[in-house]
Amino acid sequence: MKTKRALIVFGSVIVTLLAGCGRGALDLAEQQDKPEGSPIVVGFSQVGAESEWRVANSESMKSTLSEENGYELIFDDARNEQENQIRAIRTFIQQDVDYIVFSPRVETGWTSILQEARDAGIPVIVIDRDIEVEDRSLYTAYIGSDFRKEGETAVAWLENLLQKKGRTENPVRIVHIQGTIGSSAQIGRTAALEDALERNPNWQIVKQELGDFTRAKAYEVMGAILKETKDIDVVYCENDGEALGAIDAMEEAGLSCNTEGGVIVISFDATKLGLSYCLQGKIALNVECNPLQGPYVAEIIQQLERGETVEPVKHVEETAFDCFTITKEMIEGRGY
């Protein structure tokens, strides 16, 4: 609540200056007007609703930052447009919310609006995808995945599989379907694959196309690739939506997706639908990208409400599933 937030800032101004938590200077007298017991108002700009993962992420935020839990959540769907997100954040500032949370479409282009939030004394929490700014103190914390680590998990698993199959010298032809260019998920997962290509000279990228994290786009680009070549060993997709679209296109073209003589499909997210494909063997490996980030956001907000120092980076817990070890019980126990 604003009264508590003002007292926190007043009582910890030295810590703020040293730690650079980016909360800004608040007018204490103006903040005294909000009644004790009022909900904590949070403005949340969600990048879109392009996938099951994104829907689960939104639901996690809504269920956690609920009225029953002492919050008022102002939700905005940016429909995958950065301009819409900037507009929403500016509106949150004008509404004088207590906290701003957003999942950025891309890493860059946020400095000006974050400066506006800091000038207004509103802490900003970035979730899911990280951002790139010269002044790290412009936002309070990042909550999300270590996307580079996710990619490294995927390529290490593929290296191990190919080694077991004796595929360390013969060419391994890879189709790479990328997510939204400039997003931290795309950057991290792409970088891990590029490093693996340098380590494995027999790995070859036969095509690299933009899937934009959607099933429809991946289906479209995979269909176009298959008109040029069907000589493909691996399809490296940067989320489940892309993997499902690519599999649709390959199966229509008569290709099998499996680890026994078919196309090896690598995916990220580990949604229930993606894992059902893993159980069928159509997705060989699915690296989890945990969307249930609402509780992590609430934890940081409560720490700030108590005047505590928060971790600037909080990576969510994640694992990976492969077609050899996954079970139906694992899928049924998932929260998304």
Image: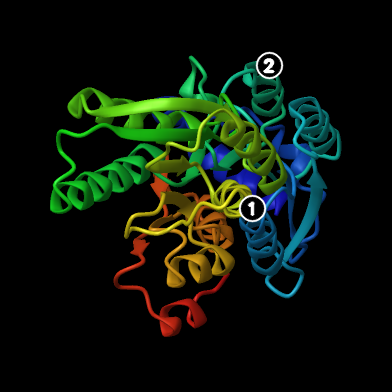
Callout 1 crowding tier (Cα within 10 Å): few <14, some 14–19, many ≥20: few
Q: Are marks 2 and 1 in contact (CB under 8 Å)?
A: no
Quarter of the image where one finds residue 285 = bottom left
Looking at the picture, how far across and down is residue 36, in whole percent? 74, 62
Which structural element holds mark 2? helix
Nearer to us in this view, 113 or 265: 265
Query: In this rendering, is residue 77 above or below 221?
Result: below
Q: Can the viewer see residue 137 in this picture?
A: yes
Q: On the picture, is 89 further left or further right than 139?
A: right
- Residue 132 is labelled as none
Label 1 belongs to which residue? 252
Q: CA distance from mark 2 to mark 1?
A: 47 Å
Task: For the N terminus, give its image quadrant.
Answer: bottom right
Q: On the picture, is 259 further left or further right than 240?
A: left
Looking at the picture, how far across and down is residue 215, in whole percent? 67, 48
**Which of the two discs, 2 and 1, labels the residue nearer the N terminus?**
2
Nearer to us in this view, 227 or 48: 227
Q: Can the viewer see residue 13 in this picture?
A: no
How many callouts does the rendering have?
A: 2
Of the residues shown, which amino acid type is indicated by label 1? Answer: Glu
Task: For the C terminus, give its image quadrant.
Answer: bottom right
Label 2 belongs to which residue? 112
Question: Which is closer to the viewer, label 2 or label 1?
Answer: 1
Query: In this rendering, is residue 271 above or below 169?
Result: below
